[in-house]
């Protein structure tokens, strides 16, 4: 890799379809072209806190993320350096001791609910995307995901949504839509918007080549 990577931010509320959009874009390019960096991997290390205290963490608040480390890693990738991406242990509510070695690629997709909330991250992006999906669809997707993938009860998911996810979305996530270059309604279902974004990426790569 000779030239500086293209950084694309994909933001949006929990359950909006960010991951579907990212996967759809990745399918249009080779594995050697696109690197996905998930903000979810960069929750703060809480190993210094008692387990009971860790349970109080609001994962939808900006303070939950270690953006300093994320920015350091993005800047290293932009400089052509390998990084060690952290892994978050959701069962222990803290960072795992394991890491993932990551090499830079031509395109870096930075995905997460609050990646457009930090101006330092925004400044690193060449294209900023906001996946805009109605709240009823987002809560349904979140319920299904948390039940099937994380073994949670319907009531616990709903309680979390009402007490933290929804108010944090309204306070922190929704306002970042104003910083987006592209707004994609309905996430991965919007093939027209995804095709246009993929075409834009291909054009940028062609100019670099």
Image: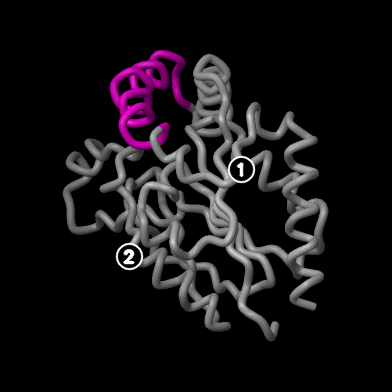
Q: Secondary structure at mark 2?
A: helix
Residue 78 located within the stretch drawn in magenta: no
Number of marks drawn: 2
Residue 163, given in percent of the width and then of the height, sits at: 29, 21
Residue 62 relative to residue 204: left or right: left
Is label 1 in a helix, a strand or a loop? strand
Few, some or many residues within 10 Å of mark 1 (<14, 14–19, 20+): some
Residue 110 placement (x, y as % from top left):
54, 56
Segment colored magenta: 152-174
The span from disc 2 to disc 1 (Cα, nearest Å) is 26 Å
Name the residue carrying label 1. Answer: 182
**Label placed on residue 68:** 2
Residue depicted at x 53% and y 14%: 136
Query: x and y percent of residue 154 in the render?
Result: 46, 15
Q: Nearer the viewer, residue 110 or 58?
A: 110
Whether the magenta-drawn stretch holds residue 156 is answered as yes
Q: What percent of the width, then of the height, locates residue 159?
A: 34, 17
Nearest the eye: 156 or 119: 119
Task: Tell me if residue 65 comes above or below residue 170 in the rendering.
Answer: below
First in sequence, mark 2 or 1: give its number: 2
Specify the quadrant that holds the C terminus: bottom right
x 35%, y 59%: residue: 67
Vertical position of residue 208 compared to residue 142: above or below: below
Quick one: quadrant of the N terminus? Answer: bottom right
Residue drawn 70% across the image and 34% down it: 188
């Amino acid at each position: 890799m000779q030239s500086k990577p293209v950084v694309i931010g994909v933001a949006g509320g929990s359950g909006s379809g960010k991951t579907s959009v990212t996967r759809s874009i990745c399918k249009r390019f080779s594995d050697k072209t696109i690197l996905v960096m998930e903000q979810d991997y960069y929750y703060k290390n809480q190993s210094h806190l008692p387990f009971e205290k860790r349970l109080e963490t609001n994962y939808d608040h900006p303070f939950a993320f270690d953006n300093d480390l994320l920015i350091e890693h993005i800047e290293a990738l932009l400089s052509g350096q390998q990084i060690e991406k952290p892994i978050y242990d959701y069962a222990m509510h803290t960072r795992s001791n394991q890491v993932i070695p990551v090499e830079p690629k031509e395109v870096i997709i930075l995905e997460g609910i609050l990646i457009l909330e930090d101006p330092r991250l925004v400044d690193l992006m060449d294209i900023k995307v906001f996946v805009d999906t109605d709240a009823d669809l987002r809560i349904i997707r979140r319920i299904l995901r948390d039940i099937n993938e994380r073994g949670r009860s319907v009531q616990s998911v709903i309680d979390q949504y009402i007490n933290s996810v929804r108010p944090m979305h309204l306070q922190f996530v929704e306002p970042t839509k104003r910083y987006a270059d592209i707004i994609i309604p309905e996430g991965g279902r919007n093939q027209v918007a995804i095709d246009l974004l993929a075409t834009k990426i291909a054009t940028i790569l062609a100019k670099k080549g």
